[in-house]
Amino acid sequence: MKQLVILSGKGGTGKTSVAAAFSHLATEGHDQISAVLADADVDAANLELVLAPHILERDDFWGGQVAKISQAPCISCGDCVDVCRFDAIHESGGLYHVDPIACEGCAACVYHCPYEAITMEKQIAGQWFRSESHYGPLFHAELYPAQENSGKLVTLIKQRARLLALDEGHELVIVDGPPGIGCPVISAASGADLALIVAEPSVAGVHDMQRILRTTEHFGVRALVCINKSDLYPEGSAEITSYCYDHNFEVIGTIPYDIGVTEAMTQGEPVTVYQPSGPAGQALREVWTRTISAIRDVGE
């Protein structure tokens, strides 16, 4: 069983459109491969919007802890206010309360309270789901607003997908990763056999592609690059190609701008299903063929 993670240095490059197309292409043709799908972009999950899965299992995700003041032992001395560095404790009507949004869970107030009136309590930070899509099992999640620990939730989603793949004999886990280079991206790329970087030919796109390539290289994950909307800014596409050539990264394909991709998203379908013979659909099929060939070669 191998893991393919689809990443981008920034949001809006078309990463999820590529992941949705791959989910479909994995089920047909001579490049067919049994796959489990995972949407690791838990802060803004949207692969489910394209694949329209049926939810089979729903579980809470418990995140960090927040402080809570018990009013009975509290004598309203205000020591907790003095020690809180995040202005999370406020007084109202002679009583002290913790703002759970502002609380960072450091527990300084717990250790400082002379009457042990403050405790740390776990909180539900989101939910994760096991679903069934037209193209195979899908694991996805929803992190609630203002919650942290998205890296831990990404790890949970990947672990569940990997365990199912091992239990049921699937050959591949396709991970739609989060944008950027932060903790969630590191969690998504951890253990991957291959990363596909979806780059866009814009000033920000080129810069952030370089950052994510340095990130995958740092963690020892082999990376390939495809250029989405490549014809909108040919100079940017040429800059991406030149950078990859100079740094020994392979550009395995280009995807032209195609309004059919947007239309497919509004219809809740991968573009390779909605317009299989369109410019983007054909280009994605070529990118898939090269990607699956590369991942099959890993470890051979």
Image: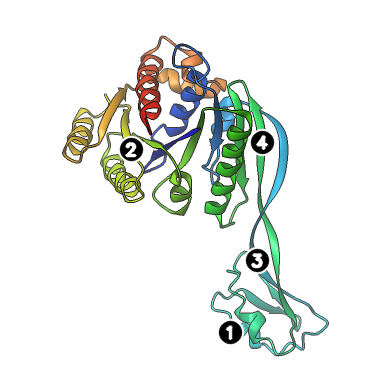
Q: Is residue 78 above or below residue 51?
A: below
Q: Which residue is mark 2?
A: 223
Foreground of the two, 156 or 11 = 156
User: Which label sits on residue 130?
Assistant: 4
Q: Are marks 3 and 1 in contact (CB under 8 Å)?
A: no
Which badge, 4 or 1, is on the more N-terminal residue?
1
Q: Position of residue 135 (x, y in %)?
A: 58, 22
What's the CA distance linking mark 1 and mark 2? 46 Å
The image quadrant of residue 137 is top right
In this rendering, the label closer to the viewer, 3 or 1:
3
Residue at the image point whose x is 25% and y is 36% from the top = 249
Q: Which residue is mark 1?
A: 83
Residue density around tag 3, few if under 14, some if 14–19, many if 20 or more, within 10 Å:
some
What's the CA distance linking mark 4 and mark 2? 28 Å
What's the CA distance linking mark 3 and mark 1? 18 Å
- Quarter of the C terminus within the rendering: top left
Q: Is residue 265 above or below residue 120?
A: above
Residue at the image point whose x is 32% and y is 27% from the top = 229
Kind of residue sitting beneath label 4:
Arg
Kind of residue sitting beneath label 3:
Gln
Residue at the image point whose x is 48% and y is 36% from the top = 176
Which badge, 1 or 2, is on the more N-terminal residue?
1
Q: Position of residue 143 (x, y in %)?
A: 60, 49
Say whether residue 238 is left or right of residue 52. left
Classify mark 2: helix, strand or loop: strand
Which badge, 2 or 3, is on the more N-terminal residue?
3
Q: Is residue 14 above or below residue 274?
A: below
